[in-house]
Amino acid sequence: ARKLLVLGPMLLCFLLGTILGSYFYTVFEVQALLIPATLTGIVGLCYMLFRQRLKGVMQNIETDRLNKDFEKIRGTMERAQQFLHAYTSRRSSKDKQLGEEEDNGQDVVIELEEG
């Protein structure tokens, strides 16, 4: 389906070109070839003149898109880092509490053995 969007207009332009070419040949004879040559020259000249400007515009568009992508990535990385820091803090505080409880349990056992 996508190919038809490209190939369809190409076929129509080819058919239109052959019809117009044969008509212009009957009117202008060999000079009819100047029409497509002139069109080709004008398009080539425009391309040559605007190539650098168009290239710069396209690079700016791509740079802006990449900067937005990097900002999204940076935000995601910061959130992940904050989550890991919070998780690590909670984990270490739980480990300290468990360690203190184990120490208290050992003190009770020692007192029972001594007593």
Image (cartoon, grey):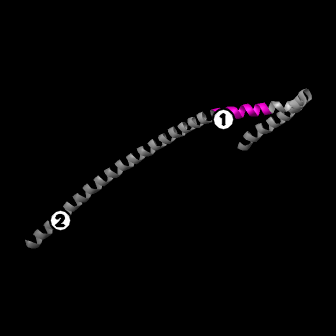
How many numbered circles does the render carry? 2
Q: Main secondary structure of the magenta part?
A: helix
Residue 57 in sight from this viewpoint: yes
Name the quadrant of the C terminus.
bottom left
Q: Residues within 10 Å of mark 1 (few under 14, many from 20)?
A: few
* Magenta region: 37-49
Q: Quadrant of the N terminus?
A: top right
The amino acid type, in three-letter code, at marker 1 is Met
Q: Residue 98: x and y, percent?
A: 23, 60
Question: Which residue is at the front of the view, 110 or 3?
Answer: 3
Residue denoted by label 2: 105
Give the camera-side residue of 27 and 71.
27
- For marks 2 and 1 on the same chain, the one whose residue lies earlier in the sequence: 1
Q: Which labelled disc corresponds to residue 33? A: none
Establish if 18 lies above or below 3: above
The image shows residue 48 at horizontal and vertical percentages of: 66, 35
The location of residue 96, given as percent across then percent down, is 22, 58
Q: Is residue 29 left or right of residue 111?
A: right
Q: Please, what secondary structure does the residue beneath circle 2 have?
A: helix
Farthest right residue? 26
Q: Residue at x 13, y 66 (%)?
A: 107
Position of 18 with respect to 67 (left or right) is right
Q: Which mark is residue 48?
A: 1
Where residue 91 appears, x then y in whole percent?
29, 56
Q: Quadrant of residue 30?
A: top right
Q: Residue at x 32, y 51 (%)?
A: 85
Q: Is residue 41 magenta?
A: yes
As drawn, the residue found furthest toward the top would be 27
From this viewpoint, is residue 20 visible? Answer: no
Q: Quadrant of residue 72?
A: top left
